[in-house]
Amino acid sequence: MPDLSDGSAQLFNRPCLAKRVRLQIDPVSGKPVLLNQEAVILLNRTGYEILEQCDGTRTLTEIIEELGNRYAIAKTTLTQDVSQYVEKLNQKGLLQWI
Amino acid sequence: MDLTDRPYGLLAELTYHCPLHCPYCSNPTRWEKQFELDTLEWEKAIQEAAELGVLQVGFSGGEPLQRKDLELLVQIARKAGLYTNLITSGLGLTENRATRLLESGLDNVQVSFQAAEPDLADGIGGVTNGHKQKLRATEIVNRVGLALSLNVVLHRFNIESLSEIIAFAEDLGATRLELANTQYYGWAYRNRSMLIPTRAQVEAAARIASGARQRLAGKMTVLYVLPDYFTNRPKPCMNGWGRRYLTVNPSGFVLPCPSAWEIPGLRFDTVREKPLHWIWQTSESFNRFRGTDWMPEPCRSCPQKEIDFGGCRCQAALLTGDPSNTDPACELSRHHHLVQEAVDREVDHPAIDSSIFRRNP
């Protein structure tokens, strides 16, 4: 059985910020930041570009395709990295699947 | 001071009045009645906190719902760009109020439960029908569409029903469950011999919590931290003194942690008299245990010193009489026997109703 723990099982599902999570700009650093009542995650540009697309209307595949248009990264690498990133945030309760 | 040291979280203790009387309450055991900050004073404090870099505010108490201006304060905080969390017993939360809080921009509601079983819960809270009102509050939170998290303080009387507590939180639709082992300061310290669980209870609870965390990943976040009395190494208290968090108490005193009020010999400044950035950056109280220069041995030469920050100053003060000692929760502390003796001491037939319950100020 293939190992699906990297989130690739979710390729056709739609990630969405969890209900109590906010994505905004940190006025002190000028960087995007992901917030809930406990977590403060300062994001780099790629993290932000992934998360701003996690609005529940796009599948993970569509998000990966869009990033593929912006960056010259091999599709397999991109799929693996984005899937893992999204899965990690899901485990932390910051993202949910629709 | 390192300029990257900015506060992320503000705990706004709006009032020390509360309908509950939990024997482990984190509010001060000695509190002279003083005028609470008014709306304008809180507005100034919240705006100054945002300018300082704070991104999250927890409205707490006591019971913050007892403040009629809570909705206004939530609006002010949201306008300042802060993530807003209401930390409440749930008592006093009507549908009308919850709707207004939602419209004011409240992000999350954290409701405390004392146990999953109503009689035990009300016995711990020292209140009649409190549990029932809390259940109603969680229904209201879900109905109006606010996010719900639960907090349950664990001790000898409820830690064995951890599985029931977790199932209870799932049933209520919580997105997050904090299982908070009692920390023995203030009221809890007075009741320590009664509340402290056995080593076997703590170990069994850790296994149950870890199973639940894996089973519920992605659905409900389960947070369980081993109590420092049982870990042999201290907790990284507040992620370091004056490093990430600040607390403003009902009279406007600014504290590096909610329990710091009871540390003897420290003088705190108030937002009534001083700008918050001065208190954070320059005040004596915030610099007293900041960084690592204040540390005595064995902390000073310890490789863990930037990880656990020497543990908890309140605990060092309470157990050893000197807040600059190594936290006795650390096995390297020469006072560690004080913690071990408390763990090993058996109390015959402990009963929750023989505890000293918190009194309102």
Image (spheres, rainbow, N blue to C red):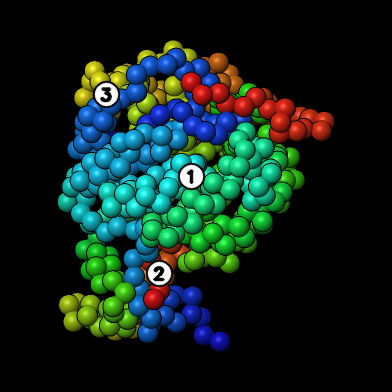
User: Residue B65's x, y, as percent?
Assistant: 40, 38
Q: Which residue is mark 2?
A: A96
Task: Calculate the distance from the C-alpha at mark 2 to the C-alpha at mark 3.
Answer: 40 Å
Please state, as top left, top right, bottom left or bottom right, where the C terminus of chain A lies in the image: bottom left
In the rendered structure, find residue B90 and report the number of the disc placed on it.
1
- Front residue (pair B166, B311): B166
Disc 3 and disc 1 on one polypeptide chain: yes
Number of marks in the image?
3
Residue placed furthest toward the right: B348
Residue B239 sits in which quadrant? top left
> What's the residue type where badge 1 is placed?
Gly
Residue drawn at x 48%, y 44% is B90
Residue B11 sits in which quadrant? top left
Residue drawn at x 51%, y 85% is A2
> What's the residue type where badge 2 is placed?
Gln
Residue B204 shown left or right of residue B130 in the figure: right
User: Residue B152's x, y, as percent?
Assistant: 57, 46
Where disc 2 sits, the SS reads strand
In the rendered structure, find residue B220 and report the number of the disc placed on it.
none
Where disc 3 sits, the SS reads loop
Q: Which residue is mark 3?
A: B271
> What's the residue type where badge 3 is placed?
Val
Disc 1 and disc 2 on one polypeptide chain: no
In the figure, B358 relative to B308: above or below?
above
Q: Chain of mark 1?
A: B
Q: Earlier in the sequence, mark 3 or mark 1?
A: 1
